[in-house]
Amino acid sequence: MSAEEYPQAPGLGTVQIHGGTTDPPSARPVRPPLYLTASYEFDTLRDARECFGQREPGFTYSRTGSPTVGLLERRLAELEGGVGAVATSSGQAALTLTLLALAGRSGQSQDGEPHPEIPAGHVVASNRIYGGTADLLNDTLAEAGIAVTWVDPHRPNEWERAVTERTRAFLVESVGNPHADLPDIPDIAAIAHAAGSALVVDNTLATPHLLQPGKLGADVVVHSVTKYLTGNGSALAGIVVDTGRFSPSSDAARWPQFTAPRRRFGNQSLVAGHGEHGAFLHLVRAQLLNDLGPSLAPWNAQQALDGIETLDVRVDRHCRVAEGIARRLASHPRVRSVRHPSLPGSSDAAIADRDFPRGTGAVLSFEIDGTTDDVERFFDSLELFKLAANLGDGRSMATHPAWTTHCRLTPELREAGEITEQTVRLALGREDVEDLWQDLSTSLDRVTGASPNQAPTAREKETVRA
Ligand SMILES: *Cc1c(COP(=O)(O)O)cnc(C)c1O
């Protein structure tokens, strides 16, 4: 605080808050700085009015963006070859905002406004998908009136048959969770576009290092940035990327939320105000992120930015570890089947060769040849693998989809997705393959039915010690 600004010496209560803060920053940090601020100052009321009225760019309040989060958005947009991005507090939030923007109520009206009496839109979604996404569509988006039809992503005619007048989005994972299956994205994109629908691809398991879905026809790419992009299991984050191929004006009557003049946006259409490639993201940011509030914390954005710097070397290593484990698992007598596209004879080998030259990621699933007691014994005897529901961490993790990540699926959806009580999902980390295999094979060797001389599991040992 300078003497010119405060001719009368300010009280300590004022100095506590304003002391030392008015000098312009002279440092130029090499690492992207962390802007921990809720709001942004304006020089004049006119500047504030124009910025809040969205007639001039700028930061107003960190719910709709901040410099640290903005850098993450631009970096991920570039990595996906897209035109822009909006970051969110989690992958779930990224999916929620995307589907509300495309398939919400206002997209079904004449004037682009959300008339309560008009039903919302419809989504056709792959049935081999993250359990949280299934919950979102079956419960929460259903409450908002958005309908869903689940289809086998590998059957083109199921996608075609599911389309209705209200369909506005197709949703698929580029690498499916939990079975690491690879849908034919160019094929699904062609069906979606013929039906006048946008294709949303969840690219979490692949990352842009392995696949850029926009190049294969996706309109919107979403990620759980929590996973491989951040890469250390420290923080939740999500992203919505506009790949630049979605163009609402080419079928204006179908997309009134973007093409009709909207009360909320100064009686202008979003396309008129923000362009063909800015309309979707502006709705996501300026309405949905602003109103619902699942904003990314700058601290979490910085964790993601740090992680992304090493994405390529990490993902390459993850892939090699997963390939080594998949091969070993496939020859273990207690393993009935292994699903990973790197395995010879995999039904997805052709798509892996065509679309994934660097590998197909580090999630795989396998079926234990045993009872549910065997399955429990297997999990409880793991030492190096963490029994945890995450992926993309450097630590390898083992998950039981039917009882954890996918536990709320309807029985029909679980059956259609081929998730049984014997299904194990592994998210391979970056440890040494031999150590991981030692842990897995030791635990699999316990899946024997009833050998009287079995060594106690780690958990049994704990119990004995207690
Ligand atoms: C984890 C995950 C999500 C949800 O992301 P969060 O960051 O946990 O909210 C969505 N899709 C896939 C494929 C995921 O693995």
Image: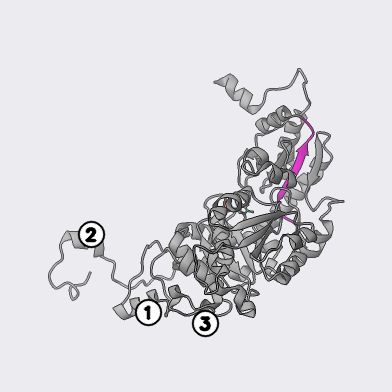
Earlier sequence position, callout 2 versus callout 3? 2
Residue beneath label 2, please? 16
Residue 456 or residue 283, whichever sits in front: 283
Q: Closer to the camera: disc 1 or disc 3?
A: 3
| SS for callout 1 | helix
Task: Classify residue 78 by image quadrant.
Answer: bottom right
Q: Closer to the camera: disc 2 or disc 3?
A: 3
| SS for callout 2 | helix
Q: Quadrant of the C terminus?
A: top right
Residue closest to the far right: 345
Label pair 2/3, CB-CB below 8 angstroms: no
Name the residue type under label 1. Answer: Glu
Q: Residue at x 87, y 51 (%)?
A: 345
Q: Which residues are magenta?
A: 359-370
Residue beneath label 3, please? 272
- Residue 279 visible? The answer is no
Earlier sequence position, callout 2 versus callout 1? 2
- Residue 127 visible? The answer is yes
Q: How many neighbours does mark 3 have within 10 angstroms: few (below 14), some (14-19), or many (20 or more)? A: some
Q: Closer to the camera: disc 2 or disc 1?
A: 1
Residue 426 or residue 293, whichever sits in front: 293
Residue closest to the far left: 8
Spatial separation of the CA atoms under disc 1 and disc 3: 17 Å
Residue closest to the far top: 452
Give residue 53's position: percent from left, percent from top.
39, 76
- The answer to whether the residue bearing label 1 lies less than 8 angstroms from the nearest atom of ligand 1 is no
Name the residue type under label 2. Answer: Gln
- Does 313 sit left or right of 8 as displayed? right
Residue beneath label 1, please? 50
